[in-house]
Amino acid sequence: MGQMVRYEDDFEADMLEDTGAYYSRKASSWIEDDSCPDYMLKSEECLKKERDRVSHYLHSSSETKLLEKVQHELLVMYANRLLEKEHSGCRALLRDDKLEDLSRMYRLYCKIPRGLDPVANIFKQHITAEGTALVEQAEDAASNQASNAPGVQEQDLISKIIKLHNKYIVYVTRCFQNHTLFHKKVPHELLVMYANRLLEKEHSGCRALLRDDKLEDLSSKYWLYCKIPQGLDPVANIFKQHITAEGTALVEQAEDAASNQASNAPGVQEQVLIRKIIELHDKYMEYVTRCFQNHTLFHKALKEAFEVFCNKTVSGSSSAELLATFCDNILKKGGSEKLSDEAIEETLEKVVKLFAYISDKDLFAEFYRKKLARRLLFDRSANDDHERSILTKLKEQCGGQFTSKMEGMVTDLTLARENQASFEDYLRNNPAAHPGIDLTVTVLTTGFWPSYKSFDLNLPAEMVKCVEVFKGFYETETKHRKLTWIYSLGTCHINGKFEEKTIELIVSTYQAAVLLLFNASDRLSYSEIMAQLNLTHDDLVRLLHSLACAKYKILSKEPNTKTISQSDYFEFNSKFTDKLRRIKIPLPPVDERKKVVEDVDKDRRYAIDAAIVRIMKSRKVLGHQQLVSECVEQLSRMFKPDIKAIKKRMEDLITRDYLERDKDNPNLFRYLA
Amino acid sequence: MEKIDRLFNSYANNSLGMIDPDGIEALCSDLGVDYTDVRILMLAWKLKAERQGYFTQDEWRTGLKALGVDSLSKLKKALPELENEVGKSSNYEDFYSYAFRYCLTEEKQKSVDIESICELLNLVLGAQFHPQVDLLIEYLKVQSDYKVINLDQWMNFLRFCKEQISFPDLENYDASQAWPLILDNFVEWMREKHS
């Protein structure tokens, strides 16, 4: 056909201009005289006629331009005036349910860029006004009727609101072709807003019902609001806030009580707190099942609420530590002997449920392991079955890797007993090798147990022989294994031949080593003892205190003060006696908290490193924020990593040439193979 | 070339076969610049000198040829031009990174101690970004998290100064971005100082 230049320049341009002028004149008079529906009808007609015109005698390329011109003059220029016409504009059409006209309005304006925005706005305003009127009616009626059937007005209102909602959904589908712009305006604006108002009522709203434990009423609220799309969201929100507030109050109470009681029974308040939290959990879980039909929304609300206050610290102890101590109290001898097996099982179940809310799971594991070790090694565990049972439950929650070490510890003890039996056989068969003292050895697999420092304690001669004899036996059992002796965990039974009577003393190996020195010397100075035993000052002071300044004074100290100083002298206290024939001299344990926290921090650094490397290895190139968020997600099963810690590890990895920053985009990182 | 070599020999330590710190000091005084002047660092950059305090004959030859000088007076005149050249943004980052690497004297060294970094910051950025550099140096001296600075952190100091973070309120600094932790801590410290 050749080029269109002549057509466009010489004909089309003028034709368009004239057309524009024509419709502009028409529109200005129509807009004055015609109602909105009529105007729209005429506009539709005009557009149709122009379309026909093009197909009859114009070039097809003119169609778009022509229609745009017409639209502009008729619809765009007068959009506001048209829609806002007082008796026939958009509002009026909505009021009078003129679905046909509204459909036409949609058809005309949907082709114009942003043309639907004003229509959608008017739609929203209209619905909002109708809804507000309903609510105000209901409020008036309710205040007039006061106590008579208080829930009735609300129910009535809800059903009216639902009807309103359904009516306008029909509009969205029939008139507005399900356009998202209109869909958005109906459900959310209308219903959730009113649900909120009703729920927040001071004396009858959701909060009040929770506060007064009105389970029946809450149940009916659930049934009402579940009919409204997203109607349960505000209910679940109030539920969550309520629980969070109650839980946080419990924690604060415990904190206050603990600081007031100070030295009296430290730790008691914290244990009481755990019990109370368990009770709280039981209480609100019942609400979820009875009132809220086990709906996931409410399970989630409960979970999120607990995650908030279950991670608070109480007098310096993290919740992870408190929970581990709670378990220790149940599982140790003298802990819960009054409870039946079933009751204990039930409590353990609940503890594990609470454990799910703790973010520092690795910290819990470490405290638990330390306490488990003490229970196992000092024969303080009440019941093997319970020990295994809680480990199984923890395994179900966190996977086998979490509990593998602890299970290893429990198994080690069983194996150790078998091993001891073999050792005793060996001694019977080799009477010459017998060290002259009854010896029980527990061999532990290093990887399973918490790390213990082993000192080069100078053992008394009698004990040296024991160690050698056992080594000889062990080498007959297995080669390729190295034994490291942890004397700090040992126990010794020593006979103290006091003047009045002989008393059997149950002491730790270290304490025994101190006491046995007095077989050779009557009187020793602190420094002499220090030199002989090769211990640290801290340890030695603790030991001597337990023997000379505590309840049972096996040694007498010169000067007779209450604390140990490096210039003291010690003697065997031959005048000591007690009504019992056998006494245990306790050695107060060292505070393990600091070490546990340090160990866990160290492990976390490795875990973060590994996660970063793993992620970068598979993605090769990744933005900073994404790397951080993926890292947090990967590690969330065990702990919540601190963003600063992640950044620090990333820097370390950059220095070690695992990662580099992109030259052009400093927020992008690259894996260096 | 001959003149260049002669100039080299006039400062070189004969037993070493290269210009050593004493030679450089002499060169400086002849050029009329201080030993610690940033222009000497720029000269080192131009020469692509590998070892701090030393210029080899090759480096000397290549460098002076690139500058287009073969005498002391011409070298002196070329210094302002050299400053301009370094100032061009395409070169500046290269020079800035060179300044750090020039301080790595040991073989496997990857980081520079805080004291030296503070001096280097002043030398290299002090003129252009005076307020930021002063505060940054103050912070580096009081903080105790880091005893050394690596290249990545060093490069980010420049980026921090260039990125027009509003000073001194630092409002548009976003810690969730990939800034090194030391700068996050610096911003926290600044905000505390000003509150």
Image: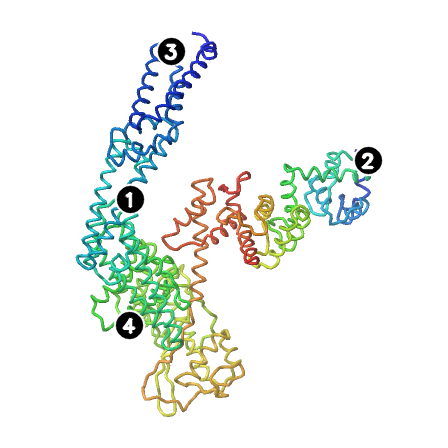
Which tag is nearer the camera, tag 4 or tag 2?
4
Dots 1 and 4: beta carbons under 8 Å? no
- Upstream in the sequence, badge 3 or badge 1? 3
Tag 4: amino acid: Gly
The residue carrying pointer 4 sits among few (fewer than 14), some (14 to 19) or many (20 or more) residues within 10 Å by Cα, namely: some
Cα separation, mark 3 vs mark 4, equals 98 Å
Q: Please give the residue where the numbered disc 1 appears in the rendered image.
A: A190
> Viewer-proximal residue, A58 or A128?
A128
Q: Please give the residue where the numbered disc 4 appears in the rendered image.
A: A335
Same subunit: marks 4 and 2:
no
SS for tag 2? Answer: helix
Same subunit: marks 3 and 4:
yes
Q: Residue at x 52, y 49 (%)?
A: A651
Q: Is residue A55 left or right of residue B134?
A: left
Residue A335 occupies quadrant = bottom left
Residue A418 position within the rendered picture, expressed as x and y whole percent measured from the top left: 29, 66
Residue A186 occupies quadrant = top left
Tag 1: amino acid: Leu
Same subunit: marks 1 and 4:
yes
Given the image, what chain letter belongs to the residue carrying mark 4? A
The residue sitting at the front extreme is: A33
Cα separation, mark 2 vs mark 1, equals 90 Å
- Residue B3: image tag: 2
Q: Residue at x 27, y 53 (%)?
A: A198
Q: Please give the residue where the numbered disc 3 appears in the rendered image.
A: A58
SS for tag 3? Answer: loop
